[in-house]
Image (cartoon, grey):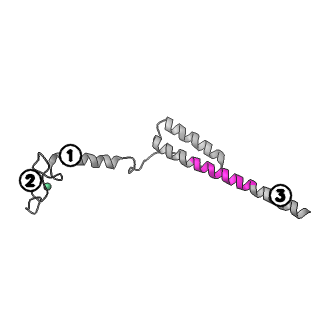
């Protein structure tokens, strides 16, 4: 059967929670659990997802499709030399893929405009 937590609050009242098995305290006041909680908080705080990575990287400049190739090679070298975490490189690889696709679409659109103009010119000449 569960016993009441032995912890005494600052207002002098006893904690109302049930003590965990083999302890006089609830999960919040068990001294052994406090250490486990602190480790979990530290781990959470240090996880990559919440940490701002202060990486000293030169910016990627992408104005044309060939710049994507240059940027990809730059990212590859940064991963290989240990400057860039592989997880970040995976994201960059994905984004570079999108950039390359965008350049391909833009190039096709330009070609289509040229073709359209030529067709229109031929029609008006007759
Ligand atoms: Zn308690």
Vertical arrangement, residue 123 with respect to residue 97, above or below: below
* Label 3 secondary element: helix
Residue at left offset 58%, top offset 47%: 97
- The residue at which mark 1 appears reads as 35
Of labels 2 and 3, the one closer to you? 2
Asked if the residue at tag 2 contacts the one at tag 1, i.e. Cβ–Cβ closer than 8 Å, the answer is no
Q: Tell whether 107 sits left or right of 79.
A: right
The Cα–Cα distance between marks 3 and 1, rounded to whole angstroms, is: 76 Å
Q: Residue furthest toward the right? A: 126
Q: What x and y, as percent, mark residue 124? A: 88, 64
Residue neighbourhood size for the residue with mark 3, other residues' Cα within 10 Å, grouped as few (<14), some (14–19), many (≥20): few
* Label 1 secondary element: helix
* Segment tinted magenta in the rendering: 96-111
Q: Tell whether 90 sits left or right of 3.
A: right
Q: What x and y, as percent, mark residue 61? A: 59, 49
Q: Residue 109 magenta-drawn?
A: yes
* Label 2 secondary element: loop
Q: Quadrant of ligand 1?
A: bottom left
The answer to whether the beta carbon of the residue marked 1 is less than 8 Å from any atom of ligand 1 is no
Vertical arrangement, residue 110 with respect to residue 46, above or below: below
Q: Overall secondary structure of the magenta stretch?
A: helix
Asked if the residue at tag 1 contacts the one at tag 3, i.e. Cβ–Cβ closer than 8 Å, the answer is no
Disc on res. 3: 2
Residue at left offset 17%, top offset 51%: 27
Q: Quadrant of residue 4?
A: bottom left
- The residue at which mark 3 appears reads as 118
- Circle nearer the N terminus (1, 2): 2
The Cα–Cα distance between marks 2 and 3, rounded to whole angstroms, is: 89 Å
Q: Quadrant of residue 14?
A: bottom left
Q: For this rendering, which residue is in front, 106 or 3? A: 3
Q: What x and y, as percent, mark residue 7? A: 10, 55
Q: Name the quarter where the C terminus is drawn.
A: bottom right
């Amino acid at each position: 059967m569960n016993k009441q937590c032995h912890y005494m609050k600052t207002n002098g009242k006893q904690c109302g929670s049930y003590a965990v098995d083999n302890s006089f305290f609830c999960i919040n006041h068990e001294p052994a659990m406090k250490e486990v909680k602190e480790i979990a908080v530290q781990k959470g705080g240090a996880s990559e997802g919440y940490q701002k990575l202060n990486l000293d990287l030169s910016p990627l400049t992408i104005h044309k499709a060939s710049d994507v190739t240059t940027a990809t090679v730059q990212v590859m070298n940064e991963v290989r030399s240990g400057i860039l975490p592989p997880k970040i490189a995976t994201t960059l690889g994905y984004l570079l893929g999108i950039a390359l696709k965008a350049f391909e679409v833009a190039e096709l659109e330009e070609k289509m405009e040229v073709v359209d103009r030529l067709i229109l010119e031929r029609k008006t000449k007759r």
